[in-house]
Image (cartoon, coloured by chain):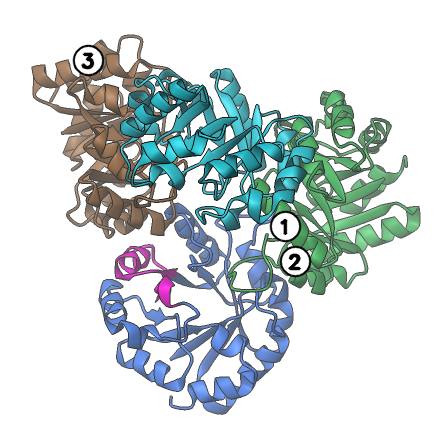
Chain colours: A blue, B green, C cyan, D brown
């Protein structure tokens, strides 16, 4: 199972969480990555943790003020990027162009989507993985694997071979195990770790059953 | 005069240009700042150069995947931000919210706009400065001070006291002097330095007449 | 006082409401206009009521599939258009271009905004009027004139001579009178009439105190 | 073959072109539809021609000022809608929601896309048809069937059973025949008819070889 912790724009210390993630990953052998703000990619990557971008722009080098260039993200130390997160929905043509930009920069890719039908579409754009996150469950603490397990199994089927992660409401080790049983190859987490009073304890408890 | 060099998503070495800018600024006393990709703010700021963001998102801390948080930009070492660059046009309500986000994070602000009427509007949103960049001149090498000097003087009048920078087509020291005579308090530059074969020579020639 | 009834995408009968508005306007002498869906402008205008568009695109004739062309809106019978409603926020440059498009087509214009600072900005773009609608009050039934009367008086001051309408939460005749006393030249209404069980009674009660 | 003529925001007379299309369709038996501005749907539909919308918003009835509601489009007389035209690119989630809105309103749907990979994705969202329009060819007079026939055949394969139309550069009867031979079930046209000096002659010449 791949555990990707999305720090969003939370008021956490990204380097502290990266250090914890590195420790827990080494101690348990579970693959854990951190997706911080673009400005924090370099300092997070310097901890040695697997580092991801939260987004890259669908552009090449050029006149694109305010963009997040895939090549710049890569140079700062990221090895992958999310695209089309439900808080940053993209146009179909821009998901395609963002994936091609990420490929050029050597970044692994996960395209997020709301439901199995959109997962089917996203998978056809040739990302490395897709992630299904029902918007209604994000931040609720109710995992999709419990609230609506068919969304996960339908997404796995719709993705026809592209690995599926699941997000929204994941916070406990039991949620991870449930997601794995439904066919997910990983999970996206955010507030469960980033906003935890004790992020180390939260992350250890999360991966303990794996 | 304030000289702000916007590196956009150009394939330049941001640290090299930042180092040059620091040298030239120290040698000449001209205020020079660099606006790199968000991922490069930290390494650019570590050179000691005045560092700006190209954009910040109109949000506070929270669930905003893929945003560029003003607080994160500031923590990485930036002291200011552009908003509403012509390559990244924002909704009126988001310029307002972006300015308030920048204020909370202690960032100086420049709001860009296309023409004197939009400059008048932008100035009422209480940025520290505004910048007029006629889209038709961006990247042309023909400075607005020569192509249409009334755009600068009309913008200065429209801004009613808010300092005005001018951009688009600025590349020589004569362009800077002309902009200053028209009432501009600074200039935005991009390709003239960032894409120059010899960025140091380009920047020295630029500020030489000041 | 100008009363503009925005039908949004409500499941009402636009021709029925237009007919009522015509009757009430003729009986009372109050200026009342209806802003239906673009598809309904022609049939609403044919009732004789003053008809407005809810939005026009910032474009001229050309290759703009899916746009709402100001000239087409005018030809269908509209005499004015809203721009930048809080449910359809526009980029600063597009409010400017939308206003110029509306001018070319001979449409009267109202630019909406959230707060007095944005009203000041919007007024500088030279619309015929501006409208202040605090997003938090839309659809609440609590009028801005009661919840926060300073937003109206501050907007009137910020607009420096451009007439100010106020919206959000207006539903009774007392709200209209209060808005007028605060300096508003009109009101934007929506659900108070469009979703009323008896739209005729609702509209008559609304304008009765004028 | 299905011939859909997109009037975009061209300065043509939509009712005149609709009348011509009705005549030519009746004389030749070729299915011809017109997609006018939303404001013109009613008057175009009244000519008896098959009428389409250029776009519908991804919303239901409600507070959506400035939207183009699928139900309103249908009530005005349209029987179908384009979505995601290259001049009006939509977010993946909004194509999905727009398709569901169109279904609720009983509208037939065509989702446009740039290339075979995006066609594959669009087809998985369950539209009635997809249309491939390489952006570089739009408005050129060089048909995709000649410039790059593999784009059409690859799109037909990628759509896995969903009918494919092709657009961009179609203007002659030979272009239609070529598109049909490549597997297309129809064509999207725009300037070739809407901007023709003699739209009747243009349309007759177009469908003559069928």
Tag 2, which secondary structure? helix
Label annotation for residue C147? none
Residue under circle 2? Answer: B70
Image-quadrant location for residue C166: top right
Q: Residue furthest front?
A: C209
Q: Is residue C5 magenta?
A: no
Residues marked 1 and 2 touching at CB (< 8 Å): yes
Quadrant of the rendered structure where residue C207 is? top left
Mark 1 crowd level (few <14, some 14–19, many ≥20, 10 Å Cα): many
**Residue depth check, mark 1 versus mark 3: number of the one nearer the observer:** 1
Q: Is residue C91 left or right of residue D166?
A: right
- Relative to residue A190, is residue B100 depicted above or below? above
The residue lying toward the viewer, choosing from C86 and B26, is C86
Q: CA distance from mark 1 to mark 2?
A: 8 Å
User: Picture coordinates of residue A54 (x, y %)?
Assistant: 51, 62
SS at mark 3 in the image: helix
Residue C120 drawn above or below residue B107? above
Q: Which residue is mark 1?
A: B98
> Is the residue at mark 1 from the same chain as the one at mark 3?
no
Q: Residue at x 30, y 56 (%)?
A: A118
Residue at the spot x=51%, y=78% of the render? A193
Q: Residue at x 62, y 78 (%)?
A: A47
- For mark 3, what is the residue? D20
Q: Position of residue A85 (x, y in %)?
A: 43, 60
Span colored in magenta: A112-137
How far apart are labels 1 and 3 at the CA level?
51 Å
Q: Give the chain of mark 3.
A: D
Mark 2 and mark 3: span between their CA atoms? 57 Å
């Amino acid at each position: 199972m791949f555990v990707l912790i999305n720090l969003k724009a939370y008021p956490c210390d990204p380097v502290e969480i990266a250090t914890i993630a590195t420790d827990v990953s080494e101690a348990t052998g579970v693959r854990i990555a951190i997706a911080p703000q673009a400005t924090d990619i370099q300092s997070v990557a310097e901890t040695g943790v697997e580092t991801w971008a939260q987004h890259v722009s669908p552009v090449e080098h050029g006149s694109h003020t305010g963009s997040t260039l895939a090549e710049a993200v890569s140079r700062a130390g990221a090895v992958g990027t999310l695209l089309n997160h439900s808080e940053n929905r993209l146009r179909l043509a821009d998901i395609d162009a963002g994936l091609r930009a990420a490929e050029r920069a050597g970044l692994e890719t996960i395209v997020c989507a709301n439901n199995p039908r959109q997962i089917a579409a996203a998978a056809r754009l040739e990302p490395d993985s897709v992630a299904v996150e029902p918007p209604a469950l994000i931040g609720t603490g109710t995992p999709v694997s419990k609230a609506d397990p068919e969304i996960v199994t339908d997404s796995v089927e719709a993705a026809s071979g592209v690995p599926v992660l699941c997000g929204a409401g994941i916070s406990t080790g039991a949620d991870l195990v449930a997601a794995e049983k439904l066919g997910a190859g990983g999970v996206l987490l955010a507030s469960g770790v980033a906003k935890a009073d004790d992020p180390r304890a939260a992350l250890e408890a999360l991966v303990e059953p794996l």
